Amino acid sequence: MHWIDWIVLIAFLGYTIWDGVRFGKESDNIEGFFLANRSMPWWAMGLSVMATQASAITFIGTTGQAYVEDMRFVQTYLAIPFAMIILCLTLVPYFNRLKNFSAYEVLEERFGLSTRLFTSFLFLLSRGLGLGIIIAAPSYVLALMLGLPLNSTILIIGVTATLYTMVGGISGVIRTDVKQMIVMITALAFCFFWIQHKLPPDISFTDSFYLAGTLGKLQAIDLNFDISQKYNIWTGVIAALFLMLSYFGTDQSQVQRYLTAKSLKDAQKSLLLTAYAKIPMQFFILLLGAMLYVFYIFGSAPITFRSTEAVAQKDQLQLTGQILEHRYNATYLNRKQAAKDLLNNKTAENAEKLRQADKQLKNIRQAELDRQEKITGSSLNDTNYILPYFILHQIPVGLIGLIIAGVFAAALSSIDSELNALATISIVDWYKRLDTRDRGAEWYLKSSRWTTVFWGVLATGAALALGETRSIIELVNKVGSYFYGSILGVFILLLWVKRANGVGALSGLICGMGTVFLFDRIFQNPQDGSLHLLMPWEQIPEAFTKSIEYLWLNPVGTAVVVGVGTVISIVWKRISSE
């Protein structure tokens, strides 16, 4: 990377640390550290909510997802407006009235300490695991662009976020999130503009859309109802609704934003900002990936966007790689010519020729990825390397630093929020609640800062252990889906099931988690349609597929918790009264 880009990146990181740390004076007690003394404006909270979710996972993984597949992933977010309206009418007023620190404090009065602690423990477990993924995501970009080992880039990101979060508290987090959101959107908008700018002069904006549509890259809606498919409109509207209700309504990293509001109206407005803006933003990021695919029809693209060390290759695999490279170059030229022919004469025959050439190119790419898997001995693809490759090879000097700063901004805006939320639950729901000794305000403030450091170190260590993975955007949602539905079920029992008690809620929560685990391990044999329950230690046959995709685990968990919790509460009440 050029020295000018280094200066831009270092200046951004330096400003971010300074900007977050300078609000430390507003965090002179735990209410200031965790809730900014309930003084945040609605627009800052709204942008912070969006920034927390729009992490580097969104920046890198979503564009790669659209490049490799299509834009159907946007269906996952169709439920957000409905979820936000429901929350504004239910949980937000409830939390605002109680003036609590933690989303899980409210469970103790109705269901007892055990339910509160177990629910908060599930949050700590799920977000602790997810935070490692969030730190790992931008590290791929930095390792590629800065020429540093992956472990080094993970440490840079983890330490930076932990430092200013520890000092600045939630006030520093929200205020830096606002600026980081602006930097991220600017970087994404520039990438989109630059893709269009770098296309051949005779390829217009409408031509690029036409080619993307011909190749199926603009497909955003799938009306088929199939719970074994990851993305269709039913998954987005029904299954994802439970995910969004739980994420924005019971996840401390999100709830903590509107707990800092000056009033109930401000808290509701902050969520409605996300309701209006999230789907267009996600659509634009996916569109960026689709346009990137069109760009590489005409621009020079490697057979894969990641490579293996040549010294690790055997002679036979080297020969296979040379053959694939030759076939790829020839097919690439055929696809390029087919695209030009289609634009000159838009007939069904020319469109089919382009699709066939594109299919052949995809098959060659997959063959090369399979070859690389044999070399490395691990199952990897290049989804997370596509946008970084474009930035590195196409963006002008000076602006590369800005784009990398955008990735950094996306990462830090999610990491700082999670760190602050994890520290809040650790102190409020566990340490302060269980410690019988009378501690002063200064003690809890100091403990809050050191707990932030603890979670920062733990999450950074998890990122180091994680290494590389497949599509990051999918992985983080999969981790959440193990927990979110069951936690949402407990809050439904709290608000709407008057007969529910602590025994029922805790039993339902345990049963919900167990059921989600079992449902996630059900696989289907495509040959005869039979279902098989396979444990983690059992090897999954190559042809088997998941019978229930991960987003549907959310309504399953919710339904089991509510059902079991209600029944056990009624039975327990009858037994106790006898």
Image: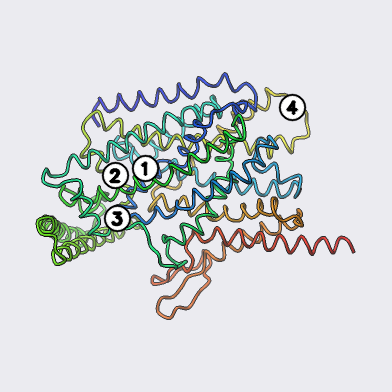
**Quick check: marks 2 and 1 in contact, CB under 8 Å?**
yes
The amino acid pointed to by label 3 is Leu
Give the image location of residue 93, x and y in percent. Answer: 65, 40
- Single out the mark in the foreground, 4 or 2: 2
In the rendered image, the vertical position of residue 77 relative to residue 565, given as above or below: above
Classed neighbour count for the residue bearing mark 2: other residues with Cα under 10 Å, few (<14), some (14–19), many (≥20) = many
Q: Amino acid at mark 2?
A: Leu
In the rendered picture of this protein, how many numbered marks are placed on residues? 4
Residue depicted at 9% across the width and 56% down the height: 344
Disc number placed over residue 387 in the picture, else none: 2
Q: Nearer the viewer, mark 3 or mark 1?
A: 3
Q: CA distance from mark 3 to mark 1?
A: 18 Å
25 lies left or right of 158: right
Q: Residues within 10 Å of mark 3 (few under 14, many from 20)?
A: many
Q: Residue at x 42, y 28 (%)?
A: 179
Q: Answer with mark 2 or mark 1, whichever residue precedes in sequence.
A: 1
Q: Amino acid at mark 4?
A: Arg
Q: Are marks 3 and 2 in contact (CB under 8 Å)?
A: no
Residue that appears at 37% across and 31% down:
183
Q: CA distance from mark 1 to mark 4?
A: 43 Å
Give yes or no for contact between labels 4 and 3 (Cβ–Cβ under 8 Å): no
Q: Answer with mark 4 or mark 3, whichever residue precedes in sequence.
A: 3
Mark 1 against mark 4, which lies toward the viewer? 1
